[in-house]
Image (cartoon, rainbow, N blue to C red):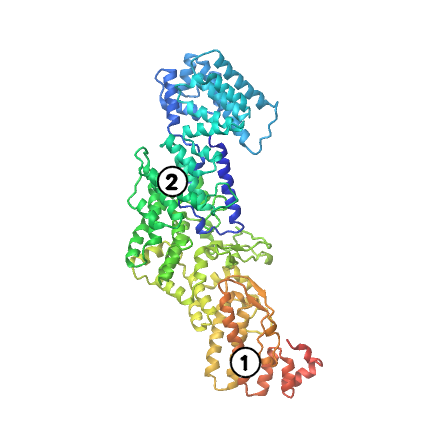
Amino acid sequence: MRLKIFITVSFLLLTMRAVACGPGPLVTPDDCDIYRLMPYYAELKEPDYGRRDANCQAWLKTVGGKVPVAAIRSAIYDLNLRDWLRVQQGDDRGNAFCRHLLAVGDSDAIRLLVWSKYYEQWSEEMRSPWYYGCGMDDCSFDIDSVISASTHHLETKKQKYVDRYLLLAMKCLYRSGRNDECVALWNKYRNVMRNSHLREQTEGYLAACLNRIGRKREAIDIYSRLGDATSLFLLVDDRVEVFERVLRNKPNSPFFPIALQRVLFVVENYVTSNEMTRFALDSLQLRRLAAIAVRAGSDNRIADKAMWRYAAACLYDHLGEPRRALPLVEKLSSGDDFLNTSIHVLRMRLHAETDPIDDAFERRLMSELRWLDARMQHEWAAADSATRFRLSHIDGFGYNYEVFRTIYANDALRRIVLASDGLYDRFRRAGRTTRALQLANMADNRFLQVSANPIVAVFRMGADGQKLYHASVDSVPTYNYDWFPIMLTDSVDNGCYGQEERFNAHDYSNVLFIYADRLGADALAAYFQRVEKPVDDMDRWLNERSYTDADYWCDIVGTHMLREMRFDEAYDWLRRVDEKYVDRLNTSVWMLYDPMEYDEVALAPADRAGYKLRFAMVMGHQEAYMTEKPDPNDRADAMLQLSIGLRNAFSYRAWPLVSYGGGYFYVWDEDLAYYDHPLHYYYRPYMLADVAAAPYAEPAEHRASELRKKAFATYTDPERKARALRRVYEYTYLMQHYADTPTGQDIARRCDRWKDYRR
């Protein structure tokens, strides 16, 4: 009962987080939870703290006989209302405890358990969003009957089960909203709970009803005495006061793990003073909580000191003081396996934040990664079948939309390596870019290997005709953690073409690709060379746990070479890419226009094969011709051809040559609109908007403009120059200066208003 409101609010917090992260497929590594005292969602359950064992022992003592405790536990907690109604009819359901109650004719116990199961079912129905009860419906009548029967048992002064009947009656009154009656019933029969193991549980319902009728201070006092920190969170705004109260009254409260986990969840997922939720904590409160946790971690009254020291370390880490956090967990261990894992993960993160990046750190990191990888495999093997199916059939983003979580070891790996200022960033700053990419690749792809994700495998194998996804034509772009729009290869919607959607979202919409796409071609080439020829054990180990497909990486390197206008090198990389792989890219449907034509010339489908490769080859040849051809007019043609190719590659016509994003925008620059001399004008109607490729557009445009000017300055043959002017639609200049050439005469014959053709 004590956690009902708390659990509801917890789910609301998770929902708000999900809304904040959308829309879009990418769950950022900064969103991965790493501060964990217990497995995911365990904090949403009321702690058992031995209550079930105590209850079963109390039943055994009450009924007497030699009934196995396991049979009592099964009967009390596993059998449902329908089962107990059959027990009431004489069916023992194959259970020794039920058989004993029937044998001794203990109708009070059977009736109590029937009513209890009815209350559980009714209470569950009430919590459903589909429940629309009314005052005199069957449920209300039956609950009134339960209350009446329970109070009648109390009034008869029977000693057997009297504490259980009081608890049941108060549960029903609380759930029915009859708070005054619940408080009155407690005041009348409270003595029956004097030595009962159910007293604290019953007092929890009393406190909830007291709070409802405005007696908040009394409710707070009861919760403080019970050590119910989670309920106090709902009544006391100062989180520090909650912990101080409970530590004074009940230093080993079973609610502390849940309360601390609640704090750590808020710390990780909500910014300081976030007004979206009243659970937000400012830095002053966090420091006070950290200080309390440190003291509790050394308090001899407290049994689980490791929990408190770990929580303190998490808080200091969040406050940006990893060097203060590290000593708290450096040699810390716990008897709980999951908490031990969390401690190890936090220690690994703190060293990743503070240790210098050098060869010695790499050796230590290798050992830590081996441990975390083994832990990931262990957690995957231990997961239930439903979890394994859900996580192995996610849509390729490394997460699913519902929970934003996979398994703890994988989320920890992504947070440590890929999050802001994580190992990727630190290795990059240390000049170890190849190792940074190797770490990022493992962090983004290892879980897909461990879970044997079949969806990603299908796309990577290139199974055509798999209509597993269909993106809406009106879909919005994805945003990464820097709020840059990401319209990457497999985010480009080609549904309007009526083709089967082959939406391999992971490979070109994941964090690894975002990082890689912002590096230069040389860094990417150096990385893949270490894939092909590893130089040490760490290379080999990381490569085995990464996505190292040659088509994927050679296409990326070649594309980056094109961005950097290194056409011969681009050709060498792109020639290694299987054409079938290129055809599977969603960008392939945008390879429509001939990039070597000034005008918009659509290519026939049969001529689109080898789009990037052919462009790299032609541009490389033109670069050679512009210096090697003996005829200056041939050199000028090559320069103009290069200019046109660069113009198209960084515009809407042929953006897949240099980009994995489909965005571009219109640019109108008054300074570039007209020049006195048209040959100095470089026509720029569009500019690439892809975040990674856009910085290369301006240098390419500048080079294209310079090549164009140089080309027209190089021509010596008037007719060749006139043809070139006609090709780029400079009709006015052509007719002003070269009207007597065959090309000029042809234009004059064909169009009497050639001035209108100037562009």
Relative to 163, 679 lies left or right = right
438, 554: nearer the viewer? 438
Q: Quadrant of the C terminus?
A: bottom right
Residue for badge 1: 709
**In the rendering, at what x and y percent does residue 8 appear?**
51, 36
22, 174: nearer the viewer? 174
Relative to 528, 729 lies left or right = right
**In the rendering, at what x and y percent does residue 399 appear?**
46, 48
Q: Callout 1: 10 Å neighbours few (<14), some, many (20+)? A: many
Viewer can see residue 338: no
Quote the CA–CA distance across marks 2 and 1.
Answer: 67 Å
Measured along the vertical axis of the image, is residue 733 above or below residue 289?
A: below
Say which label, 2 or 1, has the lower sequence index.
2
Instruction: Point out the residue furthest to the right here.
Output: 752
Local secondary structure at mark 1: helix
Residue type of the residue flagged with mark 1: Lys
Local secondary structure at mark 2: loop
In the rendered structure, are the residues bearing label 2 and label 1 in contact, judged by CB atoms less than 8 Å apart?
no
Measured along the vertical axis of the image, is residue 480 above or below residue 602?
A: above
Relative to 221, 641 lies left or right = right
Front label number (2 vs 1): 2
Residue for badge 2: 37
